[in-house]
Image (cartoon, rainbow, N blue to C red):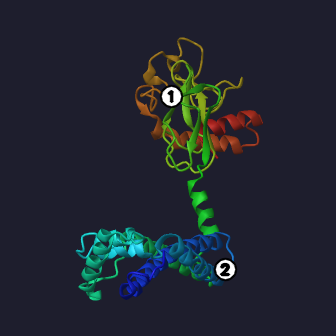
Amino acid sequence: MKENKFFPKQQSKLKNEAILRALLCGLAVGFGANFIVSLIFWLLPANGLWICLAVLVIATAVATPIFYIKRFRTNDTMNARRIDRLGLEERLITMVELEDNDSFIAQAQRRDAQAALETVDNRQLKIKISKAVVAAALICGIFGLGMTVVNGLAESGLLPGGDKLLENFVKEQKTVYVMANYLAEDGGYIEGDVAQILVQGTDAQTVTAVADDGYMFKCWSDGKTEPTRTDLTVMEDVTFTAIFIEVDDDGALDDDGQGDKPNDAPGGKDDQGNDEGDSDDPKDPDNSDDSSSGGGAWDPNNKIINGEIYYRDVLEEYQDAAEELLQDPESGLTEEEKELIKKYLGIV
């Protein structure tokens, strides 16, 4: 069907409307292709700003005539429907459909339609574009031009490339795990989870160092003296060991030189190397079972000698006497005995 057969006066405006619709659709396709290509060059990264702009022009130039030919090109049927919306009550579409009918009624209908068409003012025929087409072209244009600008700024070094942003994002999303290990030396055990797998930067679970019978907790390997610990914000693998020391039945330290026996009194050694005041003779008043006469490290009366004299009051006297004895070359003390006296009285 020929386009200008029935509506030569209206054809120009209707054709411009069809071209504008096709152009908007072509721009939507062009900007969409431009966005995709710009994104690819930004992620690589690669210098492709001019290629992105060329893709926009070429894609628009190819898509626009395709849309016009396949979707928006006008013909008499389309024009008739478009003009009938001005109030001609389908006179024109009926005229087009009865084009090849030479009956009296068909001829009369054509004369009536032509008369109605003469009353139409071309100014009434306004160009109409679908809102959906305008919105699609606008959205694609914003994304396409925006991505092109980002790509150009990345090429000039004003913005980081997509590869760097993705690398940083992957690093942030990667979960790092660390280990918190809690060990115990001889004399106790750890109450709680001794091998904890933690997300880096989180807190460890609370653990407690518990001493066995005959032992007491001394400290952790990092110097902390509280048996219960909760390590916060663990950033790397850590290992802590609980250290225990041996005590006797009365709670005093063992006799390795770190403390006194419960009934010990300060003094030197006799000729047999025994502590003075530590006689096994039950008649010896210094060997009394009364805790007040002892020097036990964990006895609350360990500062009292014979129930009368405080240990601290005579400590310097004993230390001076011991130091003189240690410096006397004729004291007859062995090196082992000298070391024991130094440890006992705290002489450095």
Q: Is residue 163 above or below residue 276?
A: below
Q: Amino acid at mark 1?
A: Gly
Total number of numbered discs in the rendering: 2
Q: Say which mark, if any, is on residue 48.
A: 2
**Could you tell me how far apart the alpha carbons at marks 1 and 2 are, in whole angstroms?**
89 Å
Foreground of the two, 144 or 199: 144
Give the quadrant of residue 270.
top right
Residue 82: x and y in percent read 34, 74
Q: Residue at x 58, y 32 (%)?
A: 194
Q: Residues within 10 Å of mark 2 (few under 14, many from 20)?
A: some
Foreground of the two, 138 or 78: 78
Q: Residues within 10 Å of mark 1 (few under 14, many from 20)?
A: many
Q: Is residue 161 visible?
A: no
Q: Is residue 32 visible?
A: yes
Instruction: Identify the element where label 1 is drawn.
Output: loop
Horizontal side of residue 72 vs 34, given as left or right: left
Question: Which residue bears the numbered disc 1?
Answer: 295
Q: Amino acid at mark 2?
A: Gly
Give the quadrant of residue 14.
bottom left
Q: Say which mark, if any, is on residue 125.
A: none
Residue 232: x and y in percent read 49, 47
Residue 235: x and y in percent read 57, 51
Q: Is residue 341 above or below residue 41?
A: above
Give the quadrant of residue 110.
bottom left
Q: Residue at x 64, y 68 (%)?
A: 163
Foreground of the two, 184 or 25: 25
Horizontal side of residue 283 vs 167, given as left or right: left
1 vs 2, front mark? 2
Q: Is residue 341 above or below residue 177?
A: above
Q: Earlier in the sequence, mark 1 or mark 2?
A: 2
